[in-house]
Amino acid sequence: MTGSPVELTVEAVRYEIDGQPLLRGVDLTARPGETVAVVGPNGSGKTTLLRCVYGTLRPTAGRVLLDGRDAGLLSVKERARKVAAVPQDGSGVPGLTVREVVAMGRSPHKRFWEQDGPGDALHVDRALETVGATAFAERRFEELSGGERQRALVARALVQGTGLLALDEPTNHLDIRYQLEVLDLVRGLPTTSLLVLHDLNLAASFCDRLYVLAAGRVVAAGPPGEVLTEDLLAEVYGVRTRIGIHPTTAAPNVVYLPPEPPTARLRHAAGGTAAP
Amino acid sequence: MKRGRTATVLLLLAAALAASAVAGLALGPVRIAPGRVLDLLLAGPGARGGAFASIVWDVRMPRVLLGAVVGAGLAVTGTVLQALVRNQLADPFLLGASSGASAGAVLVIVFGTAAGAGAVGALGGAGVPLAAFAGSMAALVTVYALARRGATMTTGRLILAGVAVQYVLSALTSLVLVLSASPDQMRSVLFWTLGGLGGARWSELALPAAALFVGTGVLVTLARPLDLLLAGEEGAHTLGLDTGRFRAAAFVLTSLVIGVLVASSGAIGFVGLMVPHAARMVVGAGHRALLPVAALGGAVFLTLADLLARTAAAPEEIPVGVVTALVGGPFFLWMLRRSGRGEGVTG
């Protein structure tokens, strides 16, 4: 169903809007078949980076390479055959059934006047089954719960048959069961996957490697166990944490501590300024 | 299952169109029994059946055909515009395209005849439709540019921009009227602004009919990219649609069809708003089924509206644009109210 996994290389990508840099030279690689997460605080450039990868934004400088070839040289359609995306707050289509929404994923392989054939229907059936959406395939998209919608949009991305999936916060608005289901599904796919995630614990247990973004730069990259440290999270997010290896999952487990008590903070502030 | 449903709907609409066409041929100042109408139809246009044959074939037939063609065209262009701006309150009239087309047509009628055998005269019969096309295109592009801020376009901005452009264009039309008011031109300008099918002649039917068949034919092939636009700018792009290029091409094509339609029937409002909405409720938002259903639905609707316009206040004739506005205005308000409750409009 999916294409052979793609190697993604992001080379010194900068993105500026009105002279304001959102990405300041990002390097990133995802080897074929890897599941890679981009994490970081709000406004660090995660979504911008993902858009540069799936092509709705064109980097101001730097390149995005797919299997070593410059993605900027591809047409919109050619690119959609290489990279499938599940954008944030995903592109709902009221009035269409789930099956129709999923079938839209065949478009990059079609002339615009061409109708879907039996081969396309087969792709759609298999994708619906993979994400467990067969039961609600004939329902209208707007009638679905958040988790069902997300699964339908993942199915649409699968039907594109690409070697790279880019997902922007695929667990947003989902309750914990569907968060786990969606991530488990993505990790199990043979494709290369690049995800933006907020939840560090989920990123640590489902992804091969993490990139930590802050103010448009990569400040740390590597396997979760090496990247997630108490010092880094204090620096990047400004939060206090305790990180251990969880005995059951063997993945790093981040425990968030409440902010320092007010008295401690006051003392801290007093010490830091020219207080009397 | 879905395909069968669409086919059933299309069959029913075709039957309804045939029935309303026969009604349109039978009713009027002279009533002709439906059986007699059918006889005359079967006898063909060459039939010399006296006054009745002439009424059916020469007077009423072109008008019924023009109504069907224009209704279908308005409904299809309305459907396409709604997808292009991603707003179900869009319609050729509300987006200023029809007013732009009338303004263009009026300018050519007034100054074209004033200039005698000028440049416009050289264009022959194509002068008015061409001016209408240019006017509708200029209005659409202006409204779209005004309503769009960055990547977002709210219903409020879209409607305000549409209303503003309509005001400017109708002021322009009035100005032309005041500056060059010959009674003859007055009458034809009134026709453009209110919309009517009274001018239907066999000789004038060819152009709108051809424009509609070609235009609708092409627009129906755009079902896939139009569906993709429903997924939003970002969604459509990641599914391989070059949204900027497609939207520009579709705007040009739609303006062309609207220009021809308005040149033949004036600015008839609300058909392009109501019919697509009703069609969507029956067959869903997928354009492969929606476009043909809207086309047939629009044909039926305008045929019946024109019948009402001709017969309701006989012997006076109400411009059909007044009839559609009387039905469509309240419908628009109802939709606006629904959209205020946060549903159904941004689709």
Image: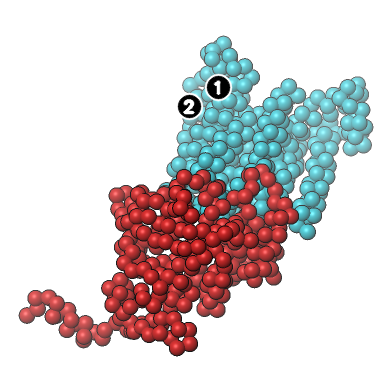
Chain colours: A red, B cyan
Asked which quadrant contains residue A13, the reply is bottom left
Whichever of labels 2 and 1 marks the residue nearer the N terminus, that label is 1
Residue at the farthest bottom position: A247
- Please state which of residues B336 and B84 is positioned toward the viewer in this rendering: B84
Identify the residue shown where x is 54% and y is 15%.
B119
Identify the residue shown where x is 74% and y is 37%.
B68
**Quadrant including the C terminus of chain A:** bottom left
Q: Which chain carries label 2?
A: B
Asked which quadrant contains residue A199, the reply is bottom left
Name the residue that disc number 1 marks. Answer: B108
Name the residue that disc number 2 marks. Answer: B175
Camera sees residue B223: yes
Asked which quadrant contains residue A154, the reply is bottom right
Query: Which amino acid type corresponds to the residue marked 1 in the rendered image?
Result: Val
Camera sees residue A39: no
Left or right of B106 in this view: A204 = left
The answer to whether marks 2 and 1 sit on the same chain is yes
- Please state which of residues A40 and A109 is positioned toward the viewer in this rendering: A109
Q: Mark 1 lies on which chain?
A: B
Q: How crowded is mark 1: few (under 14 residues within 10 Å), some or many (20 or more)?
A: many
Task: Report the number of discs.
Answer: 2
Residue B189 point in image, percent of width and height:
58, 26
